[in-house]
Image: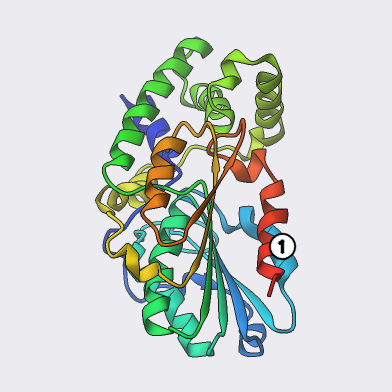
């Protein structure tokens, strides 16, 4: 059913790795002059089907010694739509940025799929630039296999329930209804105060919420089903902070906690009454991350 397929791809907000075309534009966007003069940098990576614009609050940390770079996903921000996301190649590109500029510190900020890319980039950097301080800030992280497949099952059930609540099979109508639960979890249907916040969020973002073009969701999400977080011990020495909604319907907090426990020294910060869209529902996450980036 095309409605379910479209909504499922849109809902995942996570991504993966399949062979990516070579020779295209550099996926990293940054000011070359600022990067050359910096000794540290922030690299921000959005989730699937998302523009780097959602991460622009990080522009606030740019300074004489700290540059900010953004990793662009296919079909967004000037990258060709026909390309595929490749987690390993993305990680290697970010690690090369560190090496080429002799950075003494790198802060990796990733949302959902972007958090997976950041995790893999941190592993590579710890190997290739062991003297570089690495701090990972993961927001609503995606999880290793088989969780992406199970997330798809949960999403399919959620979209069916959303269609029933909306009394419609129109993709946009159903997606907007599911968006409420995606943002705030089950409280969007059961708690009047949360429901009011969910309605306000949808109203405020209605003109920005779009369904992906045919095929783009597949190019953004296919390989995450195969990601297994190999060699987590390579993250040893990095500072790892995970910010996750306590009622995230995509990647449940209980399973996320088990995943974070497998990473050396990682910390999980659960945000009460929030779902998968922390960037919208909990903007205070930026205050916390920016404070960490500015800390010694």
Foreground of the two, 124 or 86: 124
Instruction: Tell me the residue at 36%/59% (across/down).
Output: 85
- Image coords of residue 135 (percent x, y): 54, 68
Whether residue 11 appears in this view of the structure is no
- Image coords of residue 76 (percent x, y): 51, 57
- Image coords of residue 46 (percent x, y): 52, 55
Residue marked by disc 1 = 291
Instruction: Tell me the residue at 59%/13% (across/down).
Output: 190
> Is 289 drawn above or below residue 65 in the view shown?
above
- Image coords of residue 215 (percent x, y): 34, 45
Count of labels shown?
1
Colour pattern of the rendering: rainbow
Instruction: Tell me the residue at 46%/25% (across/down).
Output: 171
The C terminus: image quadrant: bottom right
> Is 123 drawn above or below residue 175 in the view shown?
below
The N terminus: image quadrant: top left
Label 1 residue SS:
helix
- Image-quadrant location for residue 263: bottom left
Q: Taking 32 as reference, is 170 left or right?
A: left
> Is 218 drawn above or below residue 61 in the view shown?
above
Foreground of the two, 82 or 202: 202
Foreground of the two, 292 or 201: 292
> Is 243 drawn above or below residue 109 in the view shown?
above
Whether residue 140 appears in this view of the structure is yes
């Amino acid at each position: 059913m095309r409605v379910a397929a479209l909504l499922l791809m849109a809902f995942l907000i996570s991504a993966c790795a399949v062979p990516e075309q070579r020779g295209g534009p550099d996926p990293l966007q940054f000011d070359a002059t600022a990067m050359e003069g910096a000794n540290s940098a922030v690299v921000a990576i959005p989730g699937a089907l998302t523009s780097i614009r959602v991460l622009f609050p990080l522009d606030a940390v740019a300074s004489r010694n700290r540059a900010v770079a953004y990793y662009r996903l296919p079909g967004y921000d000037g990258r060709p739509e026909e390309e595929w996301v490749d987690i390993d190649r993305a990680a290697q590109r970010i690690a090369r940025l560190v090496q080429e500029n002799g950075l003494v510190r790198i802060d990796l900020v990733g949302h959902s799929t972007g958090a997976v890319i950041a995790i893999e980039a941190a592993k590579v950097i710890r190997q290739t630039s062991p003297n570089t301080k690495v701090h990972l800030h993961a927001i609503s992280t995606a999880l290793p296999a088989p969780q992406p497949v199970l997330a798809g099952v949960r999403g399919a059930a959620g979209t069916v329930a959303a269609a029933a609540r909306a009394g419609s099979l129109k993709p946009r109508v159903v997606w907007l209804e599911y968006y409420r639960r995606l943002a705030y979890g089950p409280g969007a249907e059961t708690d009047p105060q949360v429901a009011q916040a969910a309605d306000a969020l949808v109203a405020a973002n209605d003109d920005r919420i779009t369904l992906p073009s045919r095929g783009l969701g597949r190019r953004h999400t296919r390989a995450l089903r195969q990601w297994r977080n190999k060699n987590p011990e390579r993250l040893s020495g990095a500072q790892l902070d995970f910010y996750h909604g306590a009622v995230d319907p995509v990647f449940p907090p209980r399973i996320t906690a088990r995943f974070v426990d497998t990473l050396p020294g990682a910390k999980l910060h659960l945000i009460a009454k929030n779902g998968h869209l922390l960037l919208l529902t909990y903007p205070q996450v930026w205050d916390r991350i920016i404070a960490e980036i500015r800390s010694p």
